Image (cartoon, coloured by chain):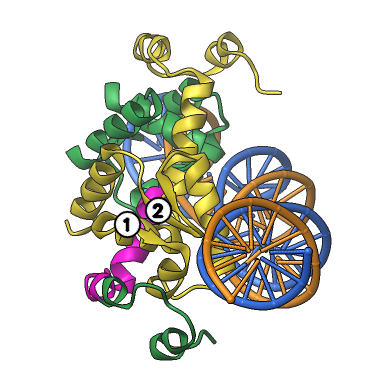
Chain colours: A yellow, B green, C blue, D orange
Amino acid sequence: MNPSFDDICQVRCIHTEKVSKVRQHMLQDDIINSLAELFKSMGDPTRLRILHALRQQELCVCDLSVVVNSSESAVSHQLRLLRTQKLVKFRREGKVLYYSLDDHHIEMLFHQGLEHVNE
Amino acid sequence: MNPSFDDICQVRCIHTEKVSKVRQHMLQDDIINSLAELFKSMGDPTRLRILHALRQQELCVCDLSVVVNSSESAVSHQLRLLRTQKLVKFRREGKVLYYSLDDHHIEMLFHQGLEHVNE
DNA sequence: TGATCATATGAACAATTGTTCAGGTTATAA
DNA sequence: TTATAACCTGAACAATTGTTCATATGATCA
């Protein structure tokens, strides 16, 4: 177990006021965890390739596996994860499932990320 | 090895035109990898707590370890990663290092992420 | 109904990750 | 120079991750 706030600060904690102020505005664990899951979902090359492809065009699993150069099984596994995290959605047309980005936040995140990477 | 584009598409590939169009606009591997590293860096609860703390206030390692309730060593390891990925920067004042967010993209990404999580 | 196509799933494996522990740096001040 | 405070680092470990392989759905059509 970690020592409590008070325990630590009796020993050493440089800026007590700053710290307690910041602590009051920390996010709840479940929010932080959801946020971590979201970014984690975007933290894999294959999934980013999938997402970038879907930025341009809705696509089925077979197409996606060709576009991102990965097996259909691998793509399907990744799509399940992206679905769970609400990054993509799909519509069915007969046997074929067409995947697309779930909402505009994903596009925004992708765009902002690209800007950061391109300095 | 994966079969080549042509190999696959001779066998089965539903929407050949769509696919080759999307393929032409795919991002280069190094861009995709950098982007993945960026999001991966934001895909951990401890690092998100650190980043969120720094959104409010520049802080030293000791303060941060109290705020995010983690050991100084753990925080230091995470800060190194965040530095490498250019998510945070620091300034020195005597023995103390004050960390802060590197640029406004990080704030934007955090904000957009929060919006998505809060539906 | 049975055959086939598009996709999903479960188990298993190597690879990666985050933390802890035990030192090691670097800058300040006595 | 020596002691101390603030921070960093490397090794090691359990836990998590992404892929592959084999198999299972579920929808369509003959």
Q: Position of residue B119 (x, y in %)?
A: 37, 24
| Element marked by disc 2 | strand
For residue B64, above or below residue C4: above
Q: Position of residue D15 (x, y in %)?
A: 72, 44
Question: Mark 2: few, some, or many residues within 10 Å (few <14, many ≥20)?
Answer: many
> Which residue bears the numbered disc 2?
A99
Question: Mark 1: few, some, or many residues within 10 Å (few <14, many ≥20)?
Answer: some
Label pair 2/1, CB-CB below 8 angstroms: yes
A7 vs D19, nearest the viewer: D19
- Magenta highlight: main SS: helix
D28 vs A50, nearest the viewer: D28
> Bounds of the magenta span?
B21-42
Q: Residue at x 28, y 37 (%)?
A: A105
Q: Residue at x 34, y 49 (%)?
A: B83
Q: Amino acid at mark 1?
A: Glu
Query: Would you identify the image quadrant in which residue B57 lies?
Result: top left
| Element marked by disc 1 | loop
Q: Position of residue A96 (x, y in %)?
A: 47, 60
Q: Amino acid at mark 2?
A: Tyr
Q: Which mark is residue A58?
A: 1
Q: Quadrant of the N terminus of chain B?
A: bottom right
